[in-house]
């Protein structure tokens, strides 16, 4: 199908999803901030309709780069990185189930196990044998799990302020287990969304793209049914003690892919000591600590973060 026709079909599907028209328009506006026109589609994976962004040349010798967002809005988080990487590489950023424009998932297990398995099935359905993976936060735990379970599928790995390297997590996130307070915290609220962005996610919230970035995030947050799905997922991800899953030394020693660990020096969600542990235990890992940056370090310092990504992913 020609790209223009595919885009029109995608728009029709997006607008048929409850809340989807607002999400699509916000995503398109965010992509435009990086000089990108929308390019993407939908595919069915294990009964879920999944949305993804797709950019860059298809005829390169290197495998596609697949970007996995964290427990925020979705694929649009990577808008500035897509723009930097798509000049020489095919770049795919998907919306995991429950995020962006993808179907909402009903979780019956830890979300990392579900998400990593789903990610590999996405590659199968897309007809992709091997990739370079990059994952932010929760998405980092997904791509790392996939790399451990399926080393033949992963050439290079980038972990950005990733989950899974320690118990540490803000106490407020643990309140999801409080019977009434957890419900309040996950209700759609622009005020709460902005406070999370300013307090925990970034160190430099007033960058020029703020309105487009937070507008996209809020549009996803208010999709009908998403608050309950996110609350249930967070209950499985955390306990009163913090993160439920922590990668063991044995897990990390199994990683065969060359790995870039990239961390904000002032991450208020997962401390930089988690990144240091990852880089120390993964055999072929290097650590880059981004100065004056929070949890979403490529928001705070996009030029520096993009330079690290391009050099690592396009190098030998």
Image (tube, helix red, strand yellow):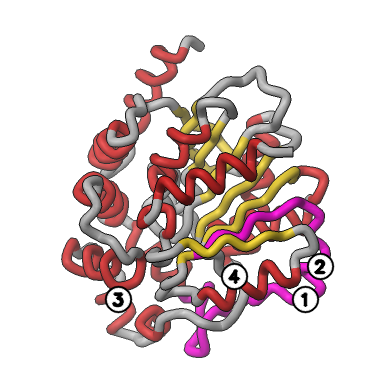
For the record, the magenta segment spans 235-263
> Which mark is first along the chain, 1 or 4?
1
Write down the quadrant of residue 268 in the picture.
bottom left
How far apart in space, not on screen, are marks 4 and 1 (Cα)? 14 Å
Tell me, yes or no, whether the highlighted magenta stretch contains residue 245.
yes
Relative to 192, 244 lies left or right: right
Q: Is residue 215 visible to the viewer in this orientation of the structure?
A: no
Q: Which element carries disc 3, helix, strand or loop? A: helix
Which residue was labeled with disc 2? 253
Q: Nearer the viewer, mark 2 or mark 4?
A: 4
Which residue was labeled with disc 1? 249
Is mark 2 in CB contact (under 8 Å) with mark 3? no
Is mark 2 in CB contact (under 8 Å) with mark 1? yes
Relative to 308, 173 lies left or right: left
8 or 204: nearer the viewer: 204
Task: Estimate how packed mark 1 is, as few (under 14), some (14 to 19) or many (20 or more) residues with alpha carbons within 10 Å.
Answer: some
Location of residue 238 in the rendering, given as x and y in whole percent from the top left corner: 51, 78
How far apart in space, not on screen, are marks 4 and 3 (Cα)? 31 Å
Which residue was labeled with disc 3? 183
């Amino acid at each position: 199908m020609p790209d223009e026709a595919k885009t029109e079909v995608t728009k029709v599907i997006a607008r048929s999803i409850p809340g989807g028209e607002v999400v699509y328009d916000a995503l398109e506006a965010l992509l435009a901030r990086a000089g990108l026109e929308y390019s993407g589609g939908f595919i069915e994976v294990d009964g879920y309709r999944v949305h993804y962004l797709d950019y860059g040349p298809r005829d390169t010798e290197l495998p596609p780069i697949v970007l996995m967002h964290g427990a925020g809005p979705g694929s649009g988080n990577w808008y500035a990185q897509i723009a930097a990487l798509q000049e020489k590489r095919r770049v795919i950023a998907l919306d995991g189930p429950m995020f962006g424009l993808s179907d909402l998932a009903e979780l019956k297990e830890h979300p990392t196990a579900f998400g990593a398995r789903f990610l590999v099935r996405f590659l199968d359905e897309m007809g992709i044998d091997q990739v370079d993976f990059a994952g932010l936060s929760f998405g980092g735990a997904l791509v790392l799990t996939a790399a451990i379970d399926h080393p033949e599928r992963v050439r290079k790995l980038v972990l950005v302020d990733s989950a899974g390297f320690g118990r540490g997590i803000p106490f407020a996130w643990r309140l999801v287990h409080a019977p009434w307070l957890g419900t309040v915290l996950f209700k759609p609220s622009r005020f709460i969304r902005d406070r999370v962005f300013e307090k925990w996610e970034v160190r430099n919230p007033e960058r020029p793209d703020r309105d487009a970035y937070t507008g996209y995030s809020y549009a996803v947050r208010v999709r009908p049914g998403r608050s309950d799905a996110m609350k249930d997922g967070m209950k499985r991800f955390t306990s009163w003690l913090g993160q439920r899953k922590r990668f063991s030394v044995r897990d990390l020693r199994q990683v065969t892919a060359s790995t870039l660990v990239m961390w904000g020096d002032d991450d208020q969600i997962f401390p930089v000591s988690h990144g240091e542990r990852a880089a120390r235990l993964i055999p072929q890992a290097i650590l880059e600590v981004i100065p004056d940056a929070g949890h979403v370090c490529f928001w705070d310092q996009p030029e520096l973060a993009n330079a690290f990504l391009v050099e690592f992913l396009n190098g030998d």
